[in-house]
Image: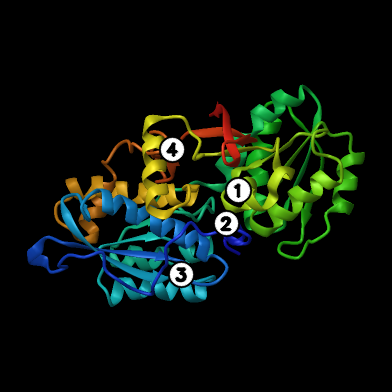
């Protein structure tokens, strides 16, 4: 399954629409100095809301820069990733072989991203992954870069803070039983146990099939745990948080999770049941910085909805290409790939970040808590995480 595939279930779109292909304008001929970029995100199926947010973020950056990246007019070619590698891999193949793009941006499904690694490498076309979070995706390959996150790193960022919070007490761990769930738990346990934490119990619930968490919550209640760490997203996140509240654990056992538990439309669907939930993520639209406030204002004005982390990841993918193309010796995929290694820091709504040696983002993480804010509920930043 996709590493973050479940995130789309229950999520809400932030406006706009996607088509199978299209152009952001400009002449793609070599004489013009234009550059073709493929944007491959879900334009149909259950993951479409993520695709809409990502398209909006990428397009906003283009709009703010006169449809140019690195001084080159952009010919943006869109393709529908769909729900699985069966549709996502051919979509990437198309924009490379038929549309002759110099770079590809997007990809929600980690299985799709893993499935196109050899394709982009053989064709010397860099892929900027703007969502898929599988831990072993980016490994220093010249043609694979990621502007989003890795599953394990988000889980790991919560390990020590939770160990400090329970002060010698134990924590119960629970997650959906698929690759992403295990990676988020593994990252958390690594840092949590290194900080002296102890696990009270562990459970993996059938992915996409669990509707009743009461048997699992009963085990949590009887475990003696002082807190709970989970990974759920999309529809499962909505149902879990509501049942955690109705079972009577909210307010008694602090609930921690990667930020997708309460991100975007999921939080709206959870309502007040989510109050007090604490999460880690590399972005919140309530981040109190000038850069983020400017971004949130521009995004909200353009799409009549606040941005999500998915929008920021795609916005930053555009910023990455902007810097690389400004320094590249031409607009070929190989030239862009070589330039990516020297772009340095990226100034982002999430804060300044850069690529690490494996081409994953070395980025800040924030401890967020769901609180009432003007206009409803929000993920309020209450601390910085390593």
Q: CA distance from mark 4 to mark 1?
A: 16 Å
Tag 2 residue: 4
Q: Is residue 110 left or right of residue 253?
A: left
Q: Is residue 220 left or right of residue 152?
A: right
Tell me, for residue 260, which label it has, or none: 1
Q: CA distance from mark 2 to mark 1?
A: 9 Å
Q: Residue furthest right?
A: 222
Q: CA distance from mark 2 to mark 4?
A: 20 Å
Q: Residues within 10 Å of mark 4 (few under 14, many from 20)?
A: many
Instruction: Indicate which disc, 2 or 4, sits on the residue closer to the N terminus.
Output: 2
- Disc 2 vs disc 1: Cβ atoms closer than 8 Å? yes
Instruction: Indicate which disc, 3 or 4, sits on the residue closer to the N terminus.
Output: 3
**Which secondary structure, mark 4?**
loop
Is label 3 or label 2 in front? 3
Is 101 drawn above or below residue 272 in the view shown? below
- Residue 282 spot, x, y in % from top left: 50, 39
Is label 2 or label 1 in front? 1
Instruction: Indicate which disc, 3 or 2, sits on the residue closer to the N terminus.
Output: 2
Tag 4 residue: 350
Tag 3 residue: 43
Residue drawn where x is 86% and y is 46% of the image: 247
């Amino acid at each position: 399954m996709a590493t973050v595939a479940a995130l789309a279930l229950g999520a809400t779109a932030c406006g706009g629409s996607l088509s199978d292909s299209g152009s952001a304008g400009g002449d793609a001929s070599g004489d013009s100095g234009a550059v073709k970029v493929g944007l491959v995100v879900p334009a149909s199926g259950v993951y479409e809301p993520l695709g809409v947010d990502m398209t909006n973020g990428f397009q906003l950056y283009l709009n703010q820069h006169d449809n140019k990246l690195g001084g080159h007019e952009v010919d943006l070619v869109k393709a529908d990733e769909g729900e699985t590698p069966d549709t996502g891999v051919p979509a990437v193949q198309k924009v490379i072989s038929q549309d002759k793009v110099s770079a590809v941006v997007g990809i929600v499904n980690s299985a799709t991203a893993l499935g196109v690694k050899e394709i982009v490498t053989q064709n010397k076309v860099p892929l900027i992954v703007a969502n898929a979070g599988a831990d072993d995706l980016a490994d220093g390959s010249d043609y694979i870069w990621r502007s989003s996150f890795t599953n394990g790193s988000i889980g790991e960022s919560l390990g020590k803070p939770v160990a400090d919070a329970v002060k010698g007490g134990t924590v119960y761990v629970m997650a959906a039983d698929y690759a992403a769930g295990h990676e988020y738990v593994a990252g958390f346990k690594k840092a949590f146990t290194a900080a002296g934490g102890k696990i009270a119990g562990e459970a993996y619930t059938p992915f996409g099939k669990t509707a009743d968490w009461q048997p699992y919550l009963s085990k949590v209640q009887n475990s003696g745990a002082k807190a709970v760490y989970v990974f759920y997203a999309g529809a499962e996140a909505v149902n879990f948080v509501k049942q955690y509240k109705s079972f009577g654990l909210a307010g008694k056992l602090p609930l921690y999770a990667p930020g997708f538990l309460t991100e975007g439309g999921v939080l709206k669907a959870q309502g007040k049941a989510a109050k007090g939930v604490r999460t880690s993520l590399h972005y919140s639209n309530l981040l109190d910085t000038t850069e983020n406030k400017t971004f949130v204002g521009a995004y909200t004005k353009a799409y009549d909805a606040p941005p999500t982390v998915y929008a920021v990841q795609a916005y930053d993918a555009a910023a990455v290409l902007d810097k690389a193309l400004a320094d590249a010796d031409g607009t070929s995929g190989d030239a862009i790939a070589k330039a990516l290694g020297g772009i340095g820091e990226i100034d982002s709504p999430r804060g300044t970040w850069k690529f690490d040696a494996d081409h994953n983002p070395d980025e800040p993480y924030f401890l967020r808590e769901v609180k009432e804010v003007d206009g409803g509920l929000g993920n309020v930043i209450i601390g910085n995480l390593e």
